[in-house]
Image (spheres, grey):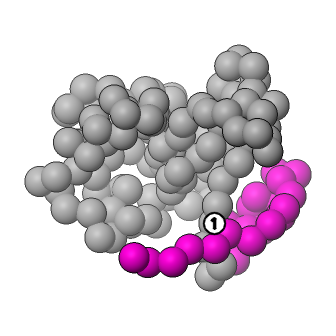
Amino acid sequence: MAFIKKMTSDSDIAETFSLIKQLRPHLQEDEYAAKIKNLQDLYGYNLVAIVEEGQIKSAAGYKITESLAWGKYLYVDDLITDNNSRSNGYAKLLIDWLELEAKNNNCEQLHLDSGVQRHVAHRFYLNRTMDITGYHFQKTL
């Protein structure tokens, strides 16, 4: 049976590397745990994973923060289901858990950004009654 686990120890974090690398291919394994720990310490980043039969099937990185524009909200930095485990309900389970986590922390909203090329993900988010509310702009410096 699948369950959601907060990944806090170095070994837990390391177990998520191959999955997160599917979403963030630029990451290096020898730096990964330290980067996650740094995000946890500085920004309140949380890493959770769906584990089934000892395997990581899906994972999300998020933080709870506040802004003038949105009030208190949960922001999903990273959300991925293993390529070989898609269409098995893991993403729905994870999004439902994130929504509950937001409510339990008195957040007013849940936010995430998604690459413009990720059409399947967009369909999933829209089916979960999420709205497209703007564009995200960036400039590499």
Left/right of residue 44 with respect to residue 110 in the rendered view:
left
Q: Is residue 114 above or below residue 73?
A: below
Mostly what secondary structure, the magenta segment? loop
Left/right of residue 19 with respect to residue 121 in the rendered view:
left
Q: Is residue 80 above or below residue 44?
A: below
Label 1's element? loop
Q: Quadrant of residue 103?
A: top right
Magenta stretch holds residue 55: no
57 and 74: which is toward the camera: 74
Magenta stretch holds residue 124: yes
What is the magenta range?
Answer: 119-141
24 and 86: which is toward the camera: 24
Q: Is residue 23 above or below residue 29?
A: below
Please rate how many residues cluster around mark 1, counting C-alpha atoms within 10 Å: few if below 14, some from 14 to 19, many from 20: some
Residue at the (33%, 70%) spot, across then down: 25
Q: Position of residue 90 (x, y in %)?
A: 59, 47
Left/right of residue 55 with respect to residue 121 in the rendered view:
left
Q: Position of residue 66 (x, y in %)?
A: 67, 33
In the rendered image, which residue does mark 1 sit on? Answer: 114
The answer to whether residue 43 shows anywhere in this view is yes
User: Which residue is situated farthest in the left direction here?
Assistant: 30
